[in-house]
Image (tube, rainbow, N blue to C red):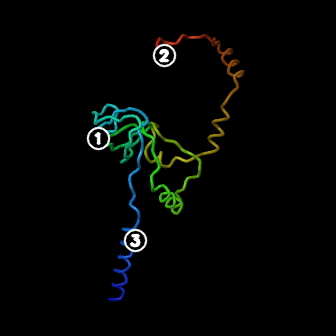
Amino acid sequence: MKTLWLKRITGICFIVAGMLSMPSISAETGTALKMDMLRVQPYADAKAAGTLTKNESLEILTKKGAWLQVKTKQSTGWVRLLSVKRTSSNNDSLKGAIDVASGRAGTGKVVSTTGIRGLSAEELKAAQFNESEIKKMESYTTTQEDAKQFANAGGLKAFKIAYLKGAK
């Protein structure tokens, strides 16, 4: 009985020692793509928590929908996802190895879900590339000539509209 207990304790010590010797996993970093407002909450109408300046380095703390919670030298707050360029971290190779080992490595077929309304978090997580649906969508394309014939058949006429002043 004592031998079994000693083996378990020794095994736990080896596991803990191995975890302590692993490189620490740091937060993801990024750079502000433009000047933007940091918000207290991940909403466009939330109170201001500070500002980002273009090319400012930041630490990405978490993500919620199309918002990132970031930490700068001056403040912490929420900013829109598209205002930040993520930079690679020292743990990308470690993450890649873990993804391969766990079967979560990418297939190279991108599924984008940023800014989609009307879908639940579960539906977004379950989204997958569907080649047959892409081909079906591409089958709906038409030529410029077919579009003109369709417009003429419906009595539609082409005309130019001047741009609004100040718009380009």
Using residue 1 as the reference point, say whether residue 159 is left or right of it.
right
Q: Residues within 10 Å of mark 1 (few under 14, many from 20)?
A: few
* The one of 97 and 106 positioned closer to us in this rendering: 97
Alpha carbon separation for disc pair 1 and 3: 36 Å
Residue type at mark 3: give it: Gly
Residue type at mark 1: give it: Gln
Using residue 59 as the reference point, say whether residue 105 is left or right of it.
right
Q: Residues within 10 Å of mark 2 (few under 14, many from 20)?
A: few
Q: Residues within 10 Å of mark 3 (few under 14, many from 20)?
A: few
What residue is shown at x 65% (from left), y 38% (from top)?
Answer: 136
Q: Secondary structure at mark 1?
A: loop
* The one of 53 and 152 positioned closer to us in this rendering: 53
Q: Give the label on residue 74, or none.
A: 1
First of labels 3, 2 by sequence position: 3
| Quadrant, the N terminus | bottom left
Q: Looking at the image, do the residues carrying marks 1 and 2 touch, with CB atoms under 8 Å apart?
A: no
Residue topped by disc 2: 167
Q: Give the label on residue 18, or none.
A: 3
